Image: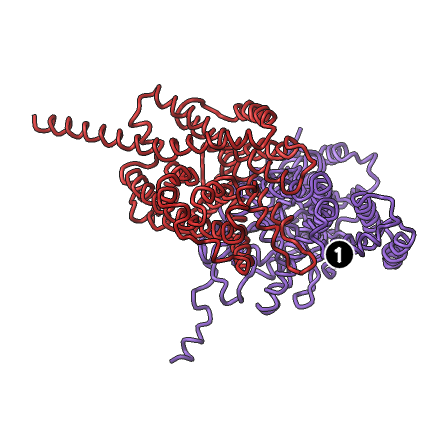
């Protein structure tokens, strides 16, 4: 068994990869983005979500196919496509994005917790738990995070399913009418800005090679057709969960009510009681949601640091994490109000569309062009 | 001067000097003679009193030496050391050593050293006989259905018990010396064709590279060889049952046993072992599943119940139905202490009781529990020092801790509980989640000899944590624990009950 302390040796099995993926996506469901979908599509949120799922699925189908048909992972593609200096710039940009991601994520969960339960606790006190967890859990590399996620992902999936099933009697069909909400333009065009919800799919390009089927000799088979099933599985679980959440949101409360809320999933869970007089599930869900955020922020932060290491910006990222956490602490200290966070999150949405979709597409196009060119030169050389 | 001389006087003086004869009251020197071809050969023997079978020395060695004067033995063609070996010390296990250091080492382990004049070697007779405890019932791993055998403090006796259970030529029991000043012996036990070779090498390397004066027990040895010493969770699974050691060995694991210790250490271990007890192998599968569920609940309650209680009553009282919340408020009306102080007082009292009960004589033990647990608890509630709810929670989690199959694991987990209580007090469920995630992280980074205590949750249908915890009927257990990485993954064929095939025909 590979020791976790070896940060360079990232080792996980398929189940763990799917688990961490589910955890990251679920933490996005707790964020402000699903609310944005509902605000854009109104009663057509389910259709809008389905549309986003299909679009991102198609885009990532081609991206993963192109990546794994040719190379081992996306790091190799970046290295083969760009010169060294651009690689360093990409590494730093991806790291900055990861840091931004962690920041928004901590902000999101902090404000959600503050608004729903810990009203008198200062938001920085809540955020401190996440920063300390970040400090501890990024010490020994990604492997232990993969390991823990394997233990909790299925519990989270079961909890979401229970939330969904228990909320079924509260779901009103009228909340889904009119079918196309405020118009087709909103659902199919303006809604595209919410595709940032699918940014974590980017990680499949970098770490997805581990889920490729291994042959008898233990060597990774670079055959996309074989690995496709696993990526399909991830996408299916994700889509199913997201749909459940969206139905949960807009089915149980009218859109007009949602506009004024901040922590949607906390709100939904608060409505569920097992007896007429009490036994609310919300506090337990707070523990679950916080748990997810601890794992998600640590994972994304470590992935960011891995970008730096793999793209040759730094040789060992371990010392860098202290500086990053101090930066995050001051950033969180400065974000004192919810309105400030909402503005920052809208910027984050656009940045993540750029990183999650535009960047890999452009990289792969450049890679193909470069490949074609080198093949042509090779052909000419062979002829001569 | 380490080489044994041919002159007996020199040897005698050396042995007396090296073993501090003038200071050691239990060191015995006995001079005697035997007759060989009309010559008197001087000899002496050395041993520590109380460590050898004195009857054997008297009736065999000394009396046979005297007998050589009255009866002329037939085999006088042999040299006199060979004659001595064949006629006088023929009834015991023998070794010959040329160096004083080797001789002294063996004498310290209870062998009798015999020097004869004119011979530059020493005979070592293995007639070790310590006073020791006889085999008793297991102390902390009781079982109703299984065998009632447990290890005692004599290493040879313990290894024999394991051999009795595993009659296989591939069972290897290797002896390794430990301790620089007070030399002791430990054994590394494994199945040659099953155990992971890399694991065996690591264990051997770690044990042989210990540089210390003394290691008295398996527990002490564990401290020297485990990876994360400060972790409260044991990384070597202790057991006192030979049948359990046998089953672990057949899973491809290794065991260590130390002389003077009735505990064997199993390597490697994972959290899956927290849920398995000795009883599991002897009861039917459906009951086994129920037992495992109970143990899961027990672990959950033991670690988290007091913390959940604190978090709920301090931050999220809405969890309780109104009537329970009302009665909780009523029971706390006159209690001046905050919940967390109440819980900590009660937990401290519980720990105190546990410690007291371990040390008081057996007959008074139950009295201490009754007086401490029932009477004092009742009085504390009546005096409004604590509320009855707290009493129930602490009592329940305390019992849950003892429902865990292994005493050592519950010992480790009970300290984790205090951390959770304090975290729950700080920020309710948020801090509790923080504690749980960090605890899991510590588990994932704790290693039992390169194998993480938190194994991968799912590898395939048969190699996953759920399948390993909720073991299926014995005939269905085809795969050895996947965390062990044994040389042979399968313990039986896919159809182990071959008679089913005949029945179908």
Q: Which chain is red?
A: A
- Residue at the image position 48 percent from the left and 52 percent from the top: A247
Image position, residue B246 (x, y; %): 59, 58
Q: Nearer the viewer, residue B323 or B215?
A: B323
- Residue at the image position 76 percent from the left and 48 percent from the top: B51
Could you tell me which chain the residue with mark 1 belongs to? B
Q: Quadrant of the N terminus of chain B?
A: top right
Q: Quadrant of the C terminus of chain B?
A: bottom left
Determine whether the residue tagged by mark 1 lies in a helix, strand or loop.
Answer: helix
Q: Nearer the viewer, residue A3 or B189?
A: A3
Q: Mark 1 highlights which residue?
A: B396
Report which quarter residue B145 is drawn in.
Answer: bottom right
Q: Residues within 10 Å of mark 1 (few under 14, many from 20)?
A: some
Image position, residue A215 (x, y; %): 33, 48
As displayed, is residue B14 above or below residue B107? above
Q: Which chain is purple?
A: B
Q: Report if residue A35 is visible in the image.
A: yes
As displayed, is residue A330 above or below residue B394? above
Q: Report if residue B113 is visible in the image.
A: no
């Amino acid at each position: 068994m590979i020791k976790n302390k070896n940060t360079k040796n990232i080792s996980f099995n398929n189940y763990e990869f799917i688990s961490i993926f589910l955890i990251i996506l679920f933490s996005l469901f707790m964020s402000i983005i699903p609310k944005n979908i509902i605000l854009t599509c109104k009663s057509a949120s389910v259709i809008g979500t389905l549309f986003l799922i299909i679009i991102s699925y198609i885009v990532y189908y081609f991206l993963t196919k192109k990546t794994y048909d040719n190379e081992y992972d996306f790091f190799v593609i970046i290295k083969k496509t760009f010169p060294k200096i651009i690689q360093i710039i990409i590494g730093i940009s991806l790291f900055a994005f990861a840091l931004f991601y962690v920041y928004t994520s901590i902000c999101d969960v902090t404000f959600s917790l503050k608004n729903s339960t810990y009203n008198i606790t200062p938001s920085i006190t809540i955020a401190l738990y996440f920063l300390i967890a970040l400090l501890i859990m990024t010490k020994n590399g990604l492997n232990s995070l993969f390991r823990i996620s394997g233990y909790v992902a299925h519990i989270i999936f079961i909890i979401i399913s229970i939330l969904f099933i228990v909320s079924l009697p509260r779901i009103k069909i009228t909340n889904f009418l009119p079918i196309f909400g405020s118009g087709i333009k909103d659902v199919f065009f303006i809604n595209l800005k919410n595709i940032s919800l699918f940014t974590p799919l980017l990680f499949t390009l970098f770490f997805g090679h581990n889920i490729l089927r291994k042959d008898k000799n233990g060597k990774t088979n670079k055959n996309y057709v074989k690995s496709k099933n696993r990526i399909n599985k991830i996408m299916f679980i994700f889509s199913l969960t997201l749909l459940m959440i969206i139905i949960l949101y807009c089915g149980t409360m009218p859109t007009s009510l949602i506009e004024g809320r901040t922590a949607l999933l906390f709100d939904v869970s608060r409505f569920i009681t097992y007896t007429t007089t009490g036994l609310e599930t919300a506090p337990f869900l707070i523990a679950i949601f916080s748990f997810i955020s601890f794992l998600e922020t640590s994972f994304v932060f470590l992935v960011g640091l891995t970008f730096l290491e793999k793209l040759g910006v730094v040789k060992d990222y371990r010392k860098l994490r202290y500086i990053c956490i101090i930066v995050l602490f001051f950033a969180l200290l400065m974000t004192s109000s919810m309105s400030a966070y909402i503005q920052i999150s809208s910027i984050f949405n656009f940045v993540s569309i750029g990183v999650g979709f535009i960047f890999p597409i452009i990289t792969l196009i450049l890679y193909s062009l470069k490949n074609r060119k080198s093949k042509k030169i090779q052909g000419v050389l062979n002829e001569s | 001067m380490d080489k044994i001389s041919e002159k007996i006087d020199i040897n005698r003086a050396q042995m007396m000097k090296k073993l501090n004869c003038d200071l050691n009251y239990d060191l015995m020197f006995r001079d005697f003679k035997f007759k060989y071809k009309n010559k008197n050969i001087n000899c002496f023997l050395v041993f520590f009193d109380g460590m050898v079978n004195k009857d054997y020395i008297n009736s065999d060695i000394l009396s046979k030496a005297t007998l050589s004067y009255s009866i002329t033995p037939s085999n006088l063609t042999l040299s006199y050391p060979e004659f001595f070996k064949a006629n006088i010390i023929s009834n015991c296990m023998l070794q010959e050593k040329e160096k004083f250091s080797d001789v002294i080492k063996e004498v310290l382990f209870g062998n009798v050293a015999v020097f004869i004049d004119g011979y530059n070697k020493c005979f070592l007779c293995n007639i070790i006989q310590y006073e020791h405890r006889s085999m008793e019932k297991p102390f902390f791993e009781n079982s109703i259905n299984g065998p009632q055998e447990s290890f005692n403090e004599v290493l040879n006796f313990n290894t024999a018990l394991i051999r009795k259970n595993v009659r296989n030529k591939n069972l290897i029991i290797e002896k390794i010396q430990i301790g620089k000043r007070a030399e002791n012996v430990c054994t590394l036990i494994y199945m040659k064709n099953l155990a992971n070779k890399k694991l065996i090498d690591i264990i051997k390397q770690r044990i042989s590279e210990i540089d210390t004066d003394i290691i008295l027990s398996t527990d002490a040895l564990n401290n020297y060889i485990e990876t994360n010493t400060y972790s409260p969770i044991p990384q070597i699974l202790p057991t006192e049952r030979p049948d359990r050691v046998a089953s672990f060995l057949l899973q491809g694991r290794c065991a260590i046993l130390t002389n003077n210790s009735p505990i064997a250490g199993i390597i490697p271990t994972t959290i899956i072992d927290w849920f398995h007890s000795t009883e599991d192998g002897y009861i039917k599968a459906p009951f086994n599943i129920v037992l495992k569920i109970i143990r899961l609940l027990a672990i959950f309650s033991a670690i988290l119940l007091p913390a959940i209680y604190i978090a709920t009553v301090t931050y999220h009282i809405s969890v309780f139905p109104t009537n329970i919340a009302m009665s909780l408020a009523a029971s706390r009306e006159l209690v001046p202490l905050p919940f967390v102080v109440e819980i900590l007082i009660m937990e401290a009292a519980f720990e105190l009781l546990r410690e007291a009960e371990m040390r008081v004589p057996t007959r008074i033990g139950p009295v201490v529990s009754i007086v401490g647990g029932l009477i004092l608890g009742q009085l504390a509630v009546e005096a409004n020092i604590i509320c009855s709810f707290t009493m129930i929670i602490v009592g329940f989690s305390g019992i849950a801790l003892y429902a865990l199959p292994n005493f050592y694991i519950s010992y480790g987990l009970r300290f984790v509980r205090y951390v959770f209580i304090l975290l729950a007090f700080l920020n309710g469920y948020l801090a509790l989640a923080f504690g749980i995630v960090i605890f899991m992280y510590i588990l994932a980074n704790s290693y039992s000899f390169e194998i993480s205590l938190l194994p991968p949750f799912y590898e395939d249908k048969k190699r996953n944590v759920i399948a390993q915890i909720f073991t299926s009927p014995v005939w269905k257990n085809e795969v050895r624990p996947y965390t062990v990485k044994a040389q042979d993954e399968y313990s039986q064929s896919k159809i182990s009950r071959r008679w089913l095939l005949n029945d179908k025909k």
